[in-house]
Amino acid sequence: MVTLIHIASLEDPELIPYRTLRQSAEHLRQGIFVAEGEKVVRRLLESQLYVLSVLITPERLKQYDEILTARTERIKVFIAEKSLLETIVGFNLHQGIMALGKIPIQASLDSVLSESQSPHLFVAIDGLTNSENIGVLVRNCAAFGVQAILVGETSSSPYLRRAVRNSLGTVFKIPVVHCENLAVNLQLLRNSSRFKIVATHPHSEQHTIQRVDFTGHCCIVFGSEGEGISQKVLSVCDIAAAIPMQLGVDSLNVANANAVFLYEAERQRNKL
């Protein structure tokens, strides 16, 4: 059910999340996230996630009438002039729509294993805190058929606002497993599910990605650009692999490296 509410100010308490876009950590504690832009909001409304409200300009409203009325939950649609939305600090308005959703109950390892097709392809992130990189990494995962993302205890959530935006809403269809101890979870995958755990390491001299077999159950681990993968996580990996590069180049941006690794996995698994 949709309730239309025309507003002339942003003082309504239910609009606080829209007024505090730069407080993503507080949003996470409340179990909510903000979606920005036409494509991201549309993907949210097409998803199974719970939507709390939409903030939209009158010009945009007609375009969303059908998709909004198809939703089963009660959604408040706040209608505001573009000039009012432009007063929101941190929001670069160019598409006239935002939405507020509930972060889904996190998936478990058992559930993603039972609900995804074999052979499994997972990605894990260790020490990755840049939300924009995380968003692009999630988008890459969606593009190359990753079935679940394991988020280590030292990594930021893919439901931070900038991560959601940079994922272009693809985070809404990939299960996310938040790990209290990533190393332990990876060890469980190795021991009980016969996963190969592949560490992405720019300075590995033993293996390049072409020599790694990605065709079976596999979890590819990505670390921060500054520190890389922690020693604790590296110790449970089966192999460390690098992307071959010209001399003098230290490494790729983690999201770019993620795309290269996943393309190689896709090439092998589907015999491209």
Image: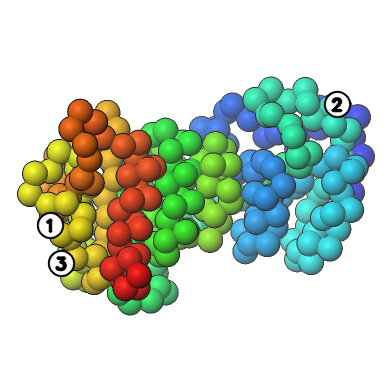
Q: Which residue is mark 2?
A: 83
**Numbered circle sitting on residue 156:** none
Q: Amino acid at mark 3?
A: Asn
**In front of the other: 77 or 40:** 40
How far apart in space, not on screen, are marks 2 and 1 (Cα)? 55 Å
Q: Earlier in the sequence, mark 3 or mark 2?
A: 2
Q: Residues within 10 Å of mark 3 (few under 14, many from 20)?
A: few
- Quadrant assignment for the N terminus: bottom right
Say which residue appears at 42% left-offset and 64% top-offset. Answer: 145
| Element marked by disc 2 | helix
Asked which quadrant contains residue 224, the reply is: top left
Across and down, in percent, residue 236 comes to 14, 52
Residue bearing mark 1: 238
Assess whether mark 3 and mark 1 are in contact (beta carbons under 8 angstroms).
Answer: no
Residue 83 in view here: yes
Q: Amino acid at mark 1?
A: Asp
